[in-house]
Image (spheres, rainbow, N blue to C red):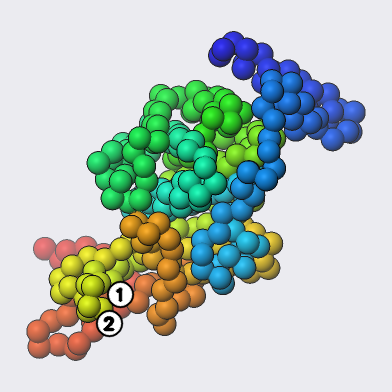
Amino acid sequence: MAQTALARERLFALRETIARLEGKPAPALAAAEREALAEGRERRQERILSRLPFGVEPFDDALEGGLQLDAITEFRAASSGDAGAASGLAMAIAARLQKQEEDTGRLLPLLWIGDAVGTLEAGRPYAPGLKDFGLKPERFFHAAPRKLEDALWLAEAAIESAAFSAVVFEVRGNPLHFGLTESRRLSLRARAVRRPLFLVRQAGEEEASSAAFRLHVEPAPSDLRPLPDGSKLSGSIGNPIFRLTLEKSRNPAPLSFLLEWNPHEREFLPVDEPSFARPPGEQSAHSGAQFSAFANGPHRPQAMGAVLAFERAS
């Protein structure tokens, strides 16, 4: 099985090289589609989902109806501290996709391909917590290849098999062997079999890729947990809230949104506050002081200026 897939990949790469030398369009997509049809994987267009809406109208409008389910969507966390937010968003979207597929009678599993280095920094999916987050644990598969090359091969094979509702590919930073060429190959596979690939990039910079959308993900302060009577439970922590900035899309400028994830209903809710459109990297509205205020000083300490080191006189 592995040797067959490897030989097929080498054949696709050779065809692309010849096409580039001849100045012709790459035939990998057409070859993949012909092979899918030859193997009997007939795609019923009326049962295949093309978009996954968030259910928040302004955000869905910015996404032209929702996330494409035959392409790559990248969730980028700029720092290691935000890796949990990027992973959480990917899980929330996967849970929403499971819910949407259940309505059409499809019960395909989800494959999460973890990054070996990223696992050391951010950990791996916690099975008992998947259900609380809205996912179906019995339809969640986790793989942890030791090398990036193995992870890339597994991602391509998983997409090409069309056996999963979605493939989540986790990568740490901007590795040398995962660039535009590898991203394009994954995009061609996803488009050929009409399956989504969710790329979770931990502590990575923006770079050229074949992703249809790229979202910069940051955590935002959660509200208090709501009670049935409409009040809030004092001292509690409510649903997770994500600050999403649409970095790559057809929009001329980045757009920022705050979305709350309700794991029980498996739906996103809009969150309105004065810092709704705060650009990424700008200080948030919560707890922005570098030092706590003194008891007999001003309510909010002033921001520190430049700090200089002086040699001791003695």
Residue highlighted by disc 1? 286
Q: Amino acid at mark 1?
A: His
- Indicate the secondary structure of the residue bearing disc 2: loop
Q: Establish if 187 lies above or below 213.
A: above
Q: Position of residue 157 (x, y in %)?
A: 57, 25
Quick one: label 1 or label 2, which is nearer the N terminus?
1
- Indicate the secondary structure of the residue bearing disc 1: loop
Q: Amino acid at mark 2?
A: Gln
Q: Position of residue 253 (x, y in %)?
A: 63, 69
Q: Position of residue 54 (x, y in %)?
A: 51, 61
Tags 1 and 2 touching, CB below 8 Å = no
Query: Does 263 sit left or right of 227 as displayed?
Result: right
Decide which of 45, 245 is in the foreground and name it: 45
Q: Establish if 8 lies above or below 44.
A: above
User: For the point 27% across and 45% down, which residue is it?
Assistant: 129
Decide which of 122, 36 is in the foreground and name it: 36
Nearer the viewer's eye, disc 1 or disc 2? Answer: 1
Quarter of the image with the C terminus in it = bottom left
Query: Does 166 sit left or right of 124 as displayed?
Result: right
Q: Is disc 1 surrounded by few (<14), some (14 to 19) or many (20+) residues within 10 Å?
A: few
Q: Position of residue 105 (x, y in %)?
A: 52, 42
Decide which of 139, 87 is in the foreground and name it: 139
Residue highlighted by disc 2? 302
Q: Is residue 130 visible?
A: yes
User: For the point 28% across and 38% down, which residue is it?
Assistant: 127
User: For the point 15% across and 66% down, which residue is it?
Assistant: 313
